[in-house]
Structure formats: structure tokens, C-alpha cells
Amino acid sequence: MNRIDPDFKEKLKPFGIGNWNECYHCGNCTATCPHTEEGFLFPRKGIRAVQMGLTESIHKNVDPWLCYYCGDCSESCPRDANPGELMMTLRRYLITKYDWTGFSRILYTSVPALIIAFILVAISIIGIGYTKNFNVNSIMEFGHQFELIAILSVAIIILLPNILRMLWFTLVKEKVRAPLLSYIIGFGDLILHMFTQKKTLKCEENRLQWFEHFILVLGYLILLFTTVFLNWFGTESIYVVFLGYIVGAVTFIITFLFIIRRIRKKSEISKYSHPSDWLFIVWLFLMGLSAFLVRVFIDLNIIGNHLWLYLLHLIVLAQWAVLIVPFGKWTHFLYRSFAIYIAKIKKEVLVKQRDKGIVTIVT
Ligand code: SF4
Ligand code: SF4
């Protein structure tokens, strides 16, 4: 049964811009969207669900994750209802729905809470520095261990249960019955899309954006691997040092370009920025830049006299690892990939039902 929440439109407002009431359902946006297909008709269907307060329909659908925000639909909308931004707004909302801790809802809807959380993390890192007498070697040793512990804890305690919740809302609760083989084979697609995001290429204008995004994801993952598993800040290997410099530079140069685009607001995709968008891009930039500078200072043998730089890097890293990765925009990386997996399974079921003459009403 689909319950109606008459206040849903109000509840959705903190997650993005809210002019979807302007929509008069001409259907231009769905006709324009290069990603919409049988069984996954968006963005108009999502707008209708929001206008009517059909929350369960929103929770069970993965449509918002299948949107790659090319902006074509917003450009073609005769009512300026901004369907592309609505998809983004729904993605933010769904992140908070999947999160079992409820913490992402607080961070997404309250800027003061967000600021307090960031300050608390910064104070904790300075406190840890104090307990280690601000000794550069001890703090760097702590920083290295922290990276590993943070990755494992966030993955096991937050992200894994949240993915299970997403599967619960979209597959289990929906009673989608597909052969076990579909679930297994689908994982190949999941991994492929997670790292390539190749569906972005369906949007003509997004080719450059796809390439930049691909290089950024690659650079970020290699930077993570280099610092955590190859101990970039502690290694003497010239190859590892060089690799770290390259991927560090890639990360902060590309994110810098993204920041400039968001400031200029020229394209549809960068017109509207929620605080979570700014946090994601600025912190990724700061991480790449501060990591790069830390290694430069190590190579110049002056990091001991400039411990502030490493502390700054550690603060940015900790805020990224315990706030942005588990509760913020970083989770798009995971949820979108799982959405493609879920959509593939649902589509298989839909096609089989259609072949058997069973008509499915998509709500
Ligand atoms: S194009 Fe605009 S008015 Fe038409 S259905 Fe889409 S959002 Fe609504
Ligand atoms: S922004 Fe692009 S991908 Fe997203 S719904 Fe609109 S047309 Fe489709």
C-alpha cells in the first residue's frame, strides 16, 4: 500500500531547490532523458510522487540514481520546474533514508550541526596531537593507522548496513523475485559501473565530464591505496613517491576545475549547489592539495618544523573519512552502482512478466 505524506514536499525542501510544483506533467523531461527506459521512467514520475507525497514509491525506486544529471530535462522543461535538480534532491533525500544512524539526515538538513561536527573532529585531532606531545613521528604514525581503521570501520559499521537497507527498500520489500543467477551475474555490472560510470556517456554533453570524473575516481582511489597501503608519507621508494605526487596533483587539479565551474554556474549541472556538494568537492581538493604538500615538506626535510601542515591534512582527512564518506555525497559512488545492479534485476523480472502476459503497474 502506498501511503500519502501530505508534508513530504516540505520535508524535501532542505535537500534541494523546490520548484517542482510548477510541473504540469507535459512529459517533455522524460521524453528528453537519455537514461529513461521501460520500467524506469523518470524524472516526471518522481515529480508526480513528490507532488502527491507518495513516499513509499520514492523509497522503493532507484530512478534518481539512474540519472546522471546531464541537465537536458531541465533545459527542455517549459515550466522551469528543474526536473534534473529534483533527481539530485531525491538522491540526497534517499541517502538519509538508507542511513541507519540518522546522522546523514542531521548533516544534510542542518548547516549548524554540520559545522559543529566538523569542528569536533578538528578538536579531536588536535587533542590527539596534544596527547602525543605534538611529536611529528608519533602523529604521523597515528595518522597512518587512523586511515586504515577509519576505512574498515566506516565500511563495516555504516556503509554495509546502509547498502543492505537500500536492497531492503528496493528489492526485498518490493518482493522482487529473480533467479539467484541474476543476482550473481549482476555483480559484474555493479563493479564495472562503479569504476567506470560509463552510462554517463549516454549524455552527449557529458563526455568531457565523464573523462574528468573517471580520472578523478582513478586518481582518488590510487591516492588512497598509495597513502594507506604503500605508506606514501613513510616510504623511501622513489616509484611510490612519484606515483603519490601524480595522483595527488590529479585530485586537486580536477577538483579545482569542478570548484570553478560551480562558482561560474554556467552549465545546468553546476547551477545549483547544496552545502553537501560544496563540502564534497572542497574537501576532496583540500585532501589532494594537503597530501601533496605534506610529501613535498617531507622531501625537503622540513615537515618537523611545519607540523601544522600535517595536522591540517589529518583534520581534513578525518573530516572526510568520518563525515563525508559515510554520510555525505561520497556515498553516491556506492548507491549509484548498486542502483544499476538493482535496476538490472528488476528489469529482468519485468521483461519475464511481460513475456508471460502479466501487466505490471509501475508506481
Ligand atoms: S518537462 Fe517540466 S513541466 Fe513537463 S513533465 Fe517535466 S518537469 Fe513537468
Ligand atoms: S538530468 Fe539528464 S539524466 Fe537526469 S533525468 Fe534529466 S535528462 Fe535524465
Image (cartoon, rainbow, N blue to C red):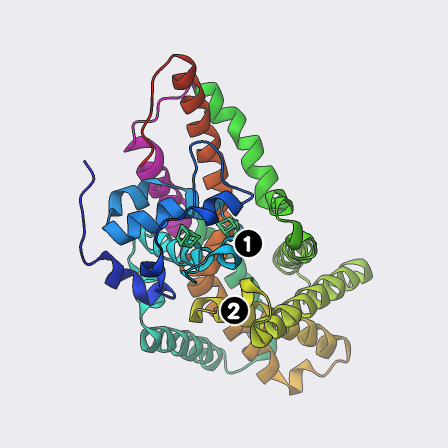
The amino acid marked with disc number 2 is Lys
Q: Quadrant of residue 213?
A: bottom right
Is 262 left or right of 349, judged from the image as shown? right
- What residue do we see at 54% from left, 57% from top? 71
Q: Tell me which segment is drawn in magenta.
A: 156-179
Residue farthest toward the bottom in the current orientation of the protein: 305
The percent position of residue 281, horizontal first and vertical second, equals: 55, 68
Q: Nearer the viewer, residue 186 or 157?
A: 186
Query: Mark 1 vs ligand 2: CB under 8 Å?
Result: yes
The mark closer to the camera, 1 or 2, is 1
| Residue 163 sits inside the magenta stretch | yes
Q: Is residue 226 magenta?
A: no
CB of mark 2 near ligand 2 (< 8 Å): no
Q: Establish if 293 lies above or below 240.
A: below
Residue at x 56%, y 54% (from the top left corner): 70
Query: What type of secondary structure mainly makes up the magenta span?
Result: helix
Q: Secondary structure at mark 1?
A: helix
Q: Which residue is mark 1?
A: 72
Name the residue at the top extreme. Answer: 356
Please state if 196 lies on the left or on the right of 273 as rendered.
right
Residue sitting farthest toward the right: 238
Residue 271: numbered disc? 2
